[in-house]
Amino acid sequence: MKKLAMIGCGGIGTYHLEHFLKYDDVELAGFCDLIPERAASFARQTGGKAFTSFMEMYDDIQPDMVFICVPPTAHGEMELEAIRRGIHLFVEKPVSLDLDLARKIRDAAEAAGIITASGFQCRYSNLVEPTCRFIDAHEIVFVECARIGGIPETPWWIKRSTSGGQIVEQTIHQFDLIRYMFGEPDTVFTMGTRGFVTGVEGYDTEDLTVTSVRFKSGALASISTGCYASDGAAFDSKITFGARDAHLDHYILSKAVIYGEKPVEEPVDESGLVIRGDGSLRRPDENQARQILEEGDAGYLCDRTFVEAVLSGDASAIRSPYADAVRTLAFTLACNKSMDSGLPVNVEA
Ligand SMILES: NC(=O)c1ccc[n+]([C@@H]2O[C@H](COP(=O)([O-])OP(=O)(O)OC[C@H]3O[C@@H](n4cnc5c(N)ncnc54)[C@H](O)[C@@H]3O)[C@@H](O)[C@H]2O)c1
């Protein structure tokens, strides 16, 4: 049986563990965390072994795949050493805060034929396909999205030097989905503001940012993200894809609603009225909305697709390979660069 290991048994590690516990075709072999109790707890739940050093874990259990679930600044040697040993890699987002390091890992993994994936589970939502179909069928002019929340409790989150800030650490999911479903960004211009979050010791990142994006297609986006809000004040907006003749609201992992789509399947009588099921007539309503609901578990699917790729050797179903996650990282780091310089920044390909 192939052996699975994990580094980082914190918040997102717990989420992945819940998925792993449903597997009967993989050995949950090793769990590593700098905090021994965390690794021990995961090991107890799975029958695997606990470690505080990833190197010792690699030596001891010789895993076939490793899930890397550590804070953004802890990446590097754990990936490079895994690649040297032929261990396949699932790396949580953001895959690093250092673009050069991420590219080095990407290139090494590619050269070694390592199967990779990253934690962009929203790509596995059943809403992605209908949204992509809508985007293919309508020329998109404008994309709009906002994510307003509070401050996560992980100690490393409050400093931009250890989290990357909210765009890179959190709203990267929205940036990634927009890239994946719509297209590549060309230029970003981001403004940030501070001073609205008070009383959080050590906090030194933006409370709110607003990013304008110009895409290679010429379309524009406005993407906002804030961590100033307490419970009731928080809101996670939809991502709206606006065309001249219709628009689609993509509520991540919840629903997609299409407005303005012409009802193509409805029978129409000679005068142009729509024939209802009971034979009565009504005017065609071009503004009627069509709603598609989230089904299934995109997070489970994201993990399972990677594991099955390692089991079969076929990585073609992975929607979020490491190399692609590096592009999303570049998108978000360009926003930080723009914020710091006060200038528009070209997103590196
Ligand atoms: N895909 C998602 O939706 C999602 C959600 C939450 C977090 N994340 C990402 O997952 C990563 C971790 O976030 P978290 O909330 O789990 O953080 P966390 O602080 O709860 O957990 C991280 C764990 O990694 C351990 N760790 C740090 N350095 C290590 C090292 N060198 N060796 C072994 N263990 C080490 C820490 O002790 C900690 O237990 C972040 O990059 C975050 O952005 C992704």
Image (cartoon, grey):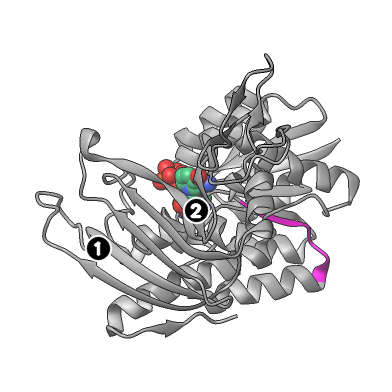
Question: Looking at this rendering, what residue extends furthest in the front direction?
Answer: 271
Q: Which residue lies furthest to the top in this view?
A: 278
Which residue, given by chain and number where applicable, does mark 2 sit on? Answer: 173
Where the N terminus falls, by quadrant?
top right
Give 193 or 258, whichever is nearer the viewer: 258
Q: Give the range drawn in magenta.
A: 112-118
Q: 211 above or below 57? A: below
Task: Indicate which label's residue lies in the foreground, 2 or 1.
Answer: 2
Can residue 57 be seen here? no
Query: What residue is pinned by disc 1?
Result: 205
Q: What residue type is labelled 2?
A: His
Whether the residue carrying mark 2 lies under 8 Å from ligand 1 is answered with yes
Q: Could one spot residue 171 in this view of the protein?
A: yes
Quarter of the C terminus within the rendering? bottom right
The percent coordinates of residue 122 (x first, y second) are 58, 45
Q: What element carries label 2?
A: helix
**Residue under the image location 53 percent in, 39 percent down:** 257
Q: Is residue 127 above or below residue 276?
A: below
